[in-house]
Image: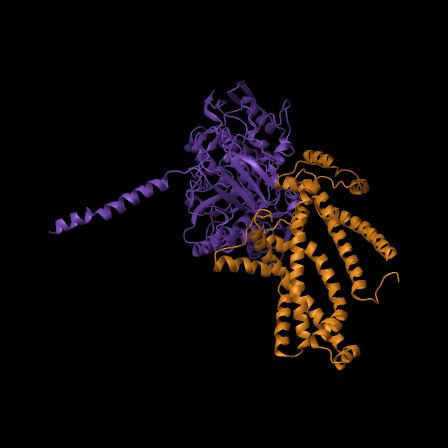
Amino acid sequence: MKRFRFASLVLHPALVMALIMAVASLATAQTPKSGGALNVMLREDLPQGFAIHESSTYSTSFPALPCFNNLVFFDPAKPTESMDTIVGDLAERWSWQDNYKNLVFFLRKDVKWHDGKPFTSKDVKFTFDMLRETSDARAKLRINPRKDWYANIEHIEAADPHTVVFRLKRPQPALLMMLASGYSPVYAAHIPPAQYRTSCIGTGPFKLKEWRRGEFVEYVKNPDYFVKGRPYLDGLKYVVIVERGTRTAALQAGQLDTACPGETSKTTMDQLKKAVPQMVFHTVAQDVTDNIIMNVKKAPFDNPKVRLAVSYAIDRRGLIQASHQGGAILGAAMLPRPFGIWGVSDKDLLTMPGYGKADEMKARAKKLLAEAGITPDKPLKVEMGTRAIAIYIDMASYVINELKQVGIDATLKQVETAQWHAMATRGDYQIGANLTGLGTDDPDANFYENYACGSPRNYSQYCNEEVMKMFDRQSQELDPKKRLEQVVAIQKRLEQDAPRPILAQRLDYFAHWQHVKGLVPHNNVYNFSRFQDVWRDK
Amino acid sequence: MKTYIAQRLGIGLVTLFGMSVVIFLLLRLAPGNIVDILFSTGGYVNPAERAAIERELGLDRPLWAQYVEWMGQLAVGNLGKSYRYDLPAWEIIRPLVPVTLELAMLSLIISVVLGVPLGVISAVRQDTRLDYVLRVFSLAGLSMPSFWLGMVIILGLVAWIGWIPPVTYVRMSENFWLHAVQFMLPALAVGYRSSALIMRITRSSLLEVLREDYVRTAWAKGQTRRAVIWRHALKNAILPVVTVIGIEFAFLIGGLVVTETVFNLPGLARFLVQAILWRDYPIVQNLVMFIAVVVILSNLLVDMLYGVLDPRVRYGS
């Protein structure tokens, strides 16, 4: 009887129908739909137009990426970027030759620029010769922030219209990571690079329709896009909203479909979750660190003991709670797991300056300062420079309070944005509170840019030949396991030399409405916003 | 009359010249220039590249040469090129002007429509309960910054009804009602503050006039309340109110920065702040000159209105 009842229940027509409908709706929900457009949040107008190669902010790359393609790109569906998640883009495939000294790209043959001209290997050579500033480059960028990324390329050959060869000075497998970054799009050889500051001719899934300065950037679907069936969306509209409260209100009210990277703090997420339970959030790393820069060429920070004391003095966990309300994680120079792959493990972090128990760390800081001749009777007076922006000032204020507890009397000096990088590059400061974003989660991109001798972004002026050799060694290492060991050793060494102690790795709680599908934020703010595979379920 | 206007315009030109010198020098005294900002977005500075860009933009020339060139171009109606956007400055400024003018005019209308009648009521009902309520209302308007009120409106709307006015600018020709909604809320936020000021001036001025002998005479002659207050008293009390309205309009043209930012309206003031942050000299200089011209003209208009409203103030007679 019981069995009969159960069977009749299971076979009840209404239940079967409901089950079929549920399965069908699930299947429908998972099948991408074409059509519709998205309104995307933008925190400021495009600082350099679409000229990604002349900019180092995601205020440029985020809204410009849909216009472009790279040779290779990070798989949009995988949030953690690594060599294994690199997929072909303008290059159908690639091949390392001569023990990682030659990199050959086999280009797609069906690609057209937005103005209808065909894409060829000449465009690739044009772009990367321009970035390398070779003597025979056909164009020059007004500013060129990532020239160092390509310093190891000796020569680029456009072997035929659809094959291009990068010849390297020494093996550098990680070059692919730089090429896959959102900062490495291919420009059209027939367009002067200056023109990208006002308009965009790319090969990407979306064509620029209109850029109304200070208001919005609007794209329409590129019907000739080389990936068949993509993009799903008919258009994208990036709406510039300078006021943070209005941005959040616009997202909450549904006037925006998605936030922009780095915009949703933990507090904002909590507020939005309460107000709009159906909103979707992704906890990802920004690949942006809070760090302290100390000028190693100027007293008192030319003394390694003083630098190390500063590092020991700052309670990282306290900073994460006070300045980020828990929205950040501990880490050294590279992003730790699960967000990245090159970071120092938690166990190793505990052995590094400033990561242990706060009281013990401060006691060690005092001891080091005493050894350097700095005592409570003779406190060290310094000026702590920082950008006059809230996120910088919050961090600097916290650090000043921490330093005071070990006998360093720091006063805050707010520096206007216009002056900050000029001042830091010149080394015209003693100590500063700084933020650093990485274009790609790779040691080469980080070490050569921020710690290498002579790099313009090595603000602390740190230069250590032995460490430079360690950089080169890890860069040439072909075995990922061995490379990781070397990278960890370098990070420990950098924290021990303390030219730029890392305080925290910032997190983002990327928000979008539930009808936005296929948008997977990455653990890096620069590399995931092409919207090629994003669709609208509404 | 013509002589008077010519004199005022002459003084206006001298004022504009002074303004041009002040804004030109102040901008250059501020730390950094557009080249520093460009490198800031690159995160580094290369002295050689820096010098090349300064040369390209003409920033390497002596200050006097830059000033003379600006004045020369301005005289022939050429506003120069935006450093940031690499486009003619006029092309960028032109769409901003109607947005700010419309918002300023709407705010002013709201402030006059609210401020003058309430001021009259408050004066006529002096020291009654209604007067106290209206004075508290006006004091609140003066105490609340309009941007704060704007933010409260936005946050209140999104919290209570999950809706806010459009965050992208809707032209009147695209959708009249949406356009009206988009402008009404910021105009109310700004207009409330201005109306409070106008109400207080109207009240105090009218109270003074209501004690004049000729008003007593009008009452004694048995004229109606409406005639005494609106025809005899208010007409004489309105001169200081007109002055305040003129000043408010001039202030609104350049002073809507935060309101435009909070309501995300693409107006002059919001853009001016962005241009200052970017040290986009051609945009800033020309926008400031435009605002100065509006201030001078609105002051002139107010002075002309004096003559219309009060026969004793007739210029040139």
Rendered position, B46 above or below B301 = above
- Looking at the picture, tell me which residue is in the foreground, B57 or A311: B57
Confirm whether residue B187 shows in the render: yes
Q: Which quadrant of the structure image shows residue A394? A: bottom right
Measuring from the top left, give residue A109's x and y in whole percent.
48, 22
Rendered position, A38 above or below B223 = above
Confirm whether residue A482 shows in the render: no
Colouring rule applied to residues: by chain
Image quadrant occupied by the C terminus of chain A: top left
- Looking at the picture, tell me which residue is in the foreground, A316 or B274: B274
Q: Horizontally, is B228 left or right of A465 in the view?
A: right
Q: Horizontally, is B202 left or right of A391 in the view?
A: right
Measuring from the top left, give residue A452's x and y in whole percent.
57, 35
Q: Residue at x 73, y 35 (%)?
A: B55
**Outermost residue toward the bottom?**
B220
Q: Horizontally, is A458 left or right of A506 in the view?
A: right
**Outermost residue toward the left?**
A1
Provide the letter of the chain coloured orange: B
Measuring from the top left, give residue A236's x and y in whole percent.
51, 40
Query: What is the total number of numbered labels drawn onto the structure image?
Result: 0
Q: Residue at x 77, y 70 (%)?
A: B236
Q: Horizontally, is B245 left or right of A69 in the view?
A: right
Measuring from the top left, give residue B232's x and y in whole percent.
75, 73
Provide the letter of the chain coloured purple: A
